[in-house]
Amino acid sequence: MIKRSMTTGMITGLLLLCGLFLVLEPQVARAQTIRDACHADAAKICPGVKAEGGQLGDCLKQHKNDLSTGCAKALEAQAKTGK
């Protein structure tokens, strides 16, 4: 009985982790896309600005007319999803 409940608990835990991964994976992928697309822009346009607290994102948005096409598109896609 104990062995069965432990197995059920482990399966439930694994399913919850899988579900969490499925929810978070698109956000992680989107963040990586923005990092890849905006890395050079951030270094050029916002040198010394820290990524913590959204400061770097705010700086890039304030200089949207100076961004590369790839970075601008990545930030625009993020804005459309609201994340």
Image (cartoon, grey):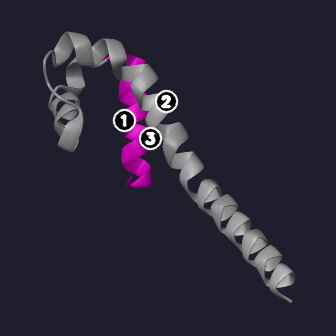
Mark 3 neighbour density, 10 Å: few (under 14) some (14–19) many (20 or more) = some
Tell me if residue 5 comes above or below residue 68 in the rendering: below
* Sequence-first disc among 3 and 2: 2
Whole-percent x, y for residue 63 in the image: 17, 25
- Could you tell me the amino acid type at mark 3? Ala
**Image-based side of 56 in relation to 39, left or right:** left
Whole-percent x, y for residue 47 in the image: 15, 15
**Image-based side of 45 in relation to 8, left or right:** left
Whole-percent x, y for residue 53 in the image: 19, 44
Residue 82 lies in the magenta stretch: yes
Q: Mark 2 highlights which residue?
A: 33
- Could you tell me the amino acid type at mark 1? Leu
Q: Depth-wise, is mark 3 or mark 2 nearer the camera?
A: 2
Tell me if residue 62 comes above or below residue 65 in the rendering: below
Q: Quadrant of residue 50?
A: top left
Whole-percent x, y for residue 35 in the image: 40, 26
What's drawn in magenta, residue-wise? 68-83
Residue 22 lies in the magenta stretch: no
Q: Secondary structure at mark 3?
A: helix
Image marks 2 and 1: residues in contact by CB distance under 8 Å: no
- Could you tell me the amino acid type at mark 2? Thr
Q: Quadrant of residue 76?
A: top left
Report the Cα–Cα distance between label 2 and label 1: 9 Å
Q: Secondary structure at mark 1?
A: helix
Mark 1 neighbour density, 10 Å: few (under 14) some (14–19) many (20 or more) = many
Q: Mark 1 highlights which residue?
A: 75
Outermost residue toward the bottom?
Answer: 1
User: Residue at 23% of width from left, 27% of height from top?
Assistant: 64
Q: Mark 3 highlights which residue?
A: 77
User: Residue at 22% of width from left, 23% of height from top?
Assistant: 65
